[in-house]
Each structure stands twice: as C-alpha cells, then as structure tokens.
Image (cartoon, grey):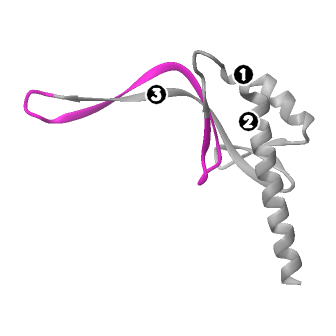
Amino acid sequence: MNIFLNNMEQRGMKIKFEYGRCNIELYNQTIEINLRQKYHRLRTENDRGWSKQEFVKSNKLEFLTGLHNRKSWLDNEKIRIEERIPNILDYIEKDFTYWRDVRKQQAEEKN
C-alpha cells in the first residue's frame, strides 16, 4: 500500500475518507478504492438436499475501484498486485480525465 500511495501522490491524487470508505480524489472528483483478501464461495449440500454456502479465504489480494462501474485486479501466479500498481493508477487517472472532460463539456453546453 505504501508503494501505491507514493505513486498516487506523485500523480497529484489524494486520499479522502468519507462515510467509512476510502476514496481517491483528483480534479475535484472521487473514486472509491478497496484492497482486500479474496474469498471463494464454496457451496455444499447435505444428505437432505439443503445447500449451504461458506466463504473460504484465499492467499490472493484483490484491488477494487469504483462503486457502480467496478474494476478489479487480482493476484495470480504470474504477476502480483504490487507489479500492477502503474496499470491501476493509469486506469484511475484515465477515468478521472474522461469524467473531467465530460463535466467540462456539460458546463459549456449549459451556458
């Protein structure tokens, strides 16, 4: 997370906590981020046919961005989440730039 925060600050992004959620702010816009341990859902059935779900922890980390339009990155055998930090920040910056341009165009059309 320190590597992520350092790279984020170099790009001019800031961390902001609101309503118990962690957000990144750039161009007066925010996007939610989340780093968590990945769980797998395991469904089992007893002898009567009733099913039950259990959530089993994995050894993989998952990084999520967004609230409605979610994007996630997951550890795997070939590439770890730490190596994906530049790609994650590129995606976030691209999303911020897109929405900044949309808001600017909307403001121009309104006037």
Which secondary structure, mark 2?
helix
Name the kind of residue labelled 2 in the image: Ile
| Mark-to-mark CA distance, 2 and 1 | 10 Å
Mark 1 or 3, nearer chain start: 3
Residue at image mark 3: 39
Name the kind of residue labelled 1 in the image: Glu
Residue 96 locus on image (x, y percent)? 80, 52
Residue 30 locus on image (x, y percent)? 76, 52
Question: Would residue 43 appear left or right of 64 to someone viewing this image?
Answer: left
Give the position of the C terminus as an image quadrant. Answer: bottom right
Residue 65 locus on image (x, y percent)? 66, 43
Q: Looking at the rendered structure, which numbered label has been put on residue 51?
A: none
Counting other residues with Cα less than 10 Å from the Cα at mark 3, is it few (<14), some (14-19), or many (20 or more)? some
Which secondary structure, mark 1?
helix
Give the position of the N terminus as an image quadrant. Answer: top right
- Total labels: the figure holds 3
Residue located at (86% from left, 42% from top): 13
Question: Would residue 71 appear left or right of 40 to someone viewing this image?
Answer: right
Q: Are marks 3 and 2 in contact (CB under 8 Å)?
A: no
**Camera-nearest label, 1 or 3:** 1
| Mark-to-mark CA distance, 1 and 3 | 19 Å
56 in magenta: yes
Question: Would residue 108 appear left or right of 16 to someone viewing this image?
Answer: right
Residues in magenta, as a range: 46-72
| Mark-to-mark CA distance, 3 and 2 | 21 Å
Q: Looking at the rendered structure, which numbered label has been put on residue 82?
A: 1
Residue at image mark 2: 88
Mark 3 or 2, nearer chain start: 3
Name the kind of residue labelled 3 in the image: Tyr
Counting other residues with Cα less than 10 Å from the Cα at mark 1, is it few (<14), some (14-19), or many (20 or more)? few
18 in magenta: no
